[in-house]
Every structure is written in C-alpha cells, then in structure tokens.
Amino acid sequence: MRRFPEGFLWGCATASYQIEGSPLADGASPSIWHRFSHTPGNVQGGDTGDVACDHYRRWRDDVALMRELGLKAYRFSIAWPRVLPDGTGRVNEAGVAFYDRLVDALLEAGIVPFATLYHWDLPGALQDRGGWANRDVVGWFTEYAGLMFERLGDRVQHWITLNEPWCVAHLGHVAGVHAPGMRDLWAGLRVAHHLLLAHGEAVAAFRASRAGRGRIGITLNLAPQHAATSSQTDRAATDRADAYHNRLFLDPLFKGRYPAVLVQHFGEAWPEVTDEDLAIIRRPIDFLGINYYSRSVVADAPGEGLLGIRHVDTAGARTAMGWEIYPQGLYELLVRLHREYGPLPLYITENGAAFDDRLDASGQVDDAERVDYLHRHFLAARRAIDDGVRLEGYFVWSMLDNFEWALGYSKRFGIVYVDYPSQRRIVKRSGRWYRQVIEANGVPE
Ligand SMILES: OC[C@H]1NNC[C@@H](O)[C@@H]1O
Ligand SMILES: [Ca+2]
C-alpha cells in the first residue's frame, strides 16, 4: 500500500456551466457559453448547458453524494453571470445565495471547498464590450473577484483565479472551437496577456480582502511535449510547443517574462507588454493547480499550423478523447514544476479520463479502465512526492458525467454516471474504488 501524506486532500472537480443547468434562473444572464452552445454548429449534437446535471437544483443531493464518496475536498466554479449579470455593478443576490448555500453545505459535510472564479462562462454583456480581448477586462474581473472574496471569503480558504487560461486564449480566440468562437491570433495573444493581468490584480485584491488569510492560486492545463526524434528540427519544434502550451503562462507567473521563442515566433502579432504588467502578473501565489491528462509527441512540420509542428501518434492506449494514457507524464511534469518553477505547494486540480461507459444489465457501470487510469496516475503522483514535490491534493475530473464543451454529453468523465433523461446518479466502480482510496489515504502498489 502506497500511503499519501497525512491530510492529503482527495477530491473531485466540476465547473459551473458543465453541471449546473438553469443558466438563466433567478436573475442570471447569458454567458458566452450559453450563446455559443445555442449557436447551431458549435456543439456536437446541438447539446447545450440548459439542463446539464441539473446541479443548480440538485446541489443538496450532490453534496450528500460527495459525503458518501468520502471526499475531503470539492473544486467547483462560480458562474460570473449569476452573481453579476451585467458583468460589473449590480449584484444578483439570488445568484450569490446559490454559492453561499453550497459552501455552507460543503462545510457541514466536512468537505473543503476550492472555488474557481473563472471556468470559461464570461457574462455575454462583457463579451459585447470586447471580452477578454479588451484590457478593461482586468478591472471587470478584479471587481468580480473582490465581490466573491467579500461574500464567501469567510468560509472559502482556497481560491483559483482562472481555469486553464490556455484554453480560453487558444481554443476560444485562435482556434475558435470554444466560446466566444474567435479566430484571431492577435486577439488570442492579447487575451493570454489580459488573463494573466486579471489574475495578478485579483491576487492583490485577495491579499487586501477578508479572505486574505486563505490561499490563492491559478490552474493551468499542462502537458509534457516530447520530441519525436532527437533531430535538431524536432527538438526546436518541441521547444516551440512547450513554450506555447506550458511556458506561455508558467514563465510570466513564476519568472516575470514571456518565453523569448514565442515573442520571436509570433513577431508582429505579439502584444504590447510593459515591465509594470510583468510585475502585476508575477505577484506571488500560494499554490499552483495543475490539470494533467496526457502528453504530446512533437515533430517539425515547416509551415504547418500556428507553430510549424505536427503531433505524432504513439502506440499507447488512448481514452475516449483520443488522449494517450501516459501516467509517467504526470510524474515528469510535477518534478519539472517543482525544480524549475517552485518549490511551492501543488494541487492536481484535474486528472481523469473519458471512456465509453455503459450501464450493464444490473444497472451498474463497471469502468475498470478508469480505475486503472486513476490508479496508475495516483502512483505517478506518489512517486513525485517521494522526490520532494509538495503535492497537497488531487481532484479527480470529474465527480459527475457532464457537458464536455464542444463535444457535448458524448464524453463521460465522471466517477458517477449521470442518466440524463432521469437525472439519476449511479456511482461507477471507479467511484466506489476512489472512496476506498480516500479511506485508506493510499493505493495498492
Ligand atoms: O476535457 C476534460 C476537462 N479538461 N479541463 C477543463 C474541463 O472543463 C474539461 O471538462
Ligand atoms: Ca450563509
């Protein structure tokens, strides 16, 4: 049995637009994901977050389910459009009350709340004013963050400013496959910079708020980039990929500069950056959240795509997302972060897998593949702790099957199955297994 440190925070993660449903209830306003999913052609099957897991109404039962699973912590996100329907100014008390009740219920169940301020559901009203591409967003986000610190900061001690800024900038503004569906490299790079500035200003607001005695951090989706061959061109390609996927955020946050290779590669598209900006971005944080799913294998491909690279297929088994199952990448990533960007407390704020789960004849889900995936990744994390990495918690993505963005409900990541027509929750084999891991605070070798 490989035991984890005493007090290790085992949890699950979710996000507002993916589980809540009721997007316009009680005074909430449309988010950019409400608009994006209601715009035909954007989401597989025409799926939307209108109902999702109906968590906005079933939250009490879901907290009871978390307690049954024995979770020590729960990572959720706050829907900005519920609490500030215009994005700034007028507070929608009914929206605040939802999160207020949720936090109280979590504490009552002995579950530590981790609140993510932004998990992609920007108020549409702010998109109409330019959204993340407008530098004014820094003030808008700081106002929103300050409100939440004020209202929940007496009970929420762990705050994450942004979830996966890379996805917001690249998928939302360069590739255009996520909300707001923009395809503009100049805008996308500005968005990355504004996200980091907003993060930095929110950190300062946090320190000044009543929540200040808690911890604040950011969550980045990071993936090791491996060169397909040792050739100079493949190694250079891999460096570009690592810079764009990983260092674009890590370097300014922890080293106060952007990767030179990107500034050079993007040339005229690269935004105006001042030293004052960099000082804001690099304000010290209390932890780094890591969302890990897989690695990439990279080869040089002159003139192809944004970076002149292509991803090389590997033999390894894959999840239903087509992502290679590569647990050692988690170990490698954690050790790199500790050595190159740390040492600071780390949380795995997301790790998990989608598989084609089906109810069997007895109405259960025997998701042995997900058990194996999690088991191997838990062991990889445990090895990193042996090497001195200050890993303090692990949030499985996700507690419930939910709305997987442009793929809609076609992908199931939950350790609990959601039968959408009936909204029944059915704990999968992986959910029962995870409860035992948490109870033992460890996994068999
Ligand atoms: O693709 C699985 C997850 N990845 N990180 C962000 C989450 O919102 C996704 O559902
Ligand atoms: Ca209260």
Image (cartoon, helix red, strand yellow):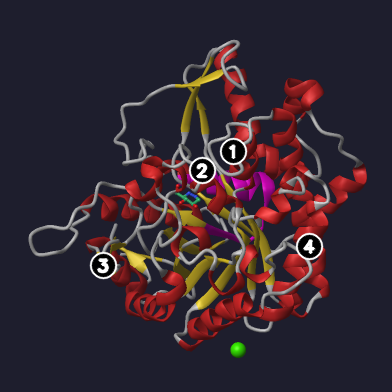
Foreground tag (4 vs 2): 2
Q: x, y percentage for residue 330?
A: 47, 46
Nearer the observer, 413 or 432 = 413
Disc 3: which residue: 422
In the image, which disc is placed on residue 181?
Answer: 1
Mark 3 residue type = Ser
Q: Are the residues at dot 3 and dot 4 in contact (C-beta closer than 8 Å)?
A: no
In the image, which disc is placed on residue 142?
Answer: 4
Looking at the image, residue 144 lies above or below residue 127: below
- Tell me the CA gap for discs 4 and 2: 29 Å
SS assignment at label 3: loop
Mark 2 residue type = Thr
Q: In this image, 298 relative to 426: left or right? A: right
Q: x, y percentage for residue 91?
A: 72, 74
Q: Are the residues at dot 1 and dot 2 in contact (C-beta closer than 8 Å)?
A: yes
Indicate the quadrant where residue 242 lies.
top right
Mark 1 residue type = Gly
Count all numbered tags in the image, as a single digit: 4
Disc 2: which residue: 39
Callout 2 crowding tier (Cα within 10 Å): few <14, some 14–19, many ≥20: few
- Tell me the CA gap for discs 4 and 1: 24 Å
Looking at the image, residue 309 lies above or below residue 60: above
Q: Earlier in the sequence, mark 1 or mark 3?
A: 1
Seen at 91% across and 40% down, the residue is 274
SS assignment at label 2: loop
In the image, which residues are magenta? 330-348
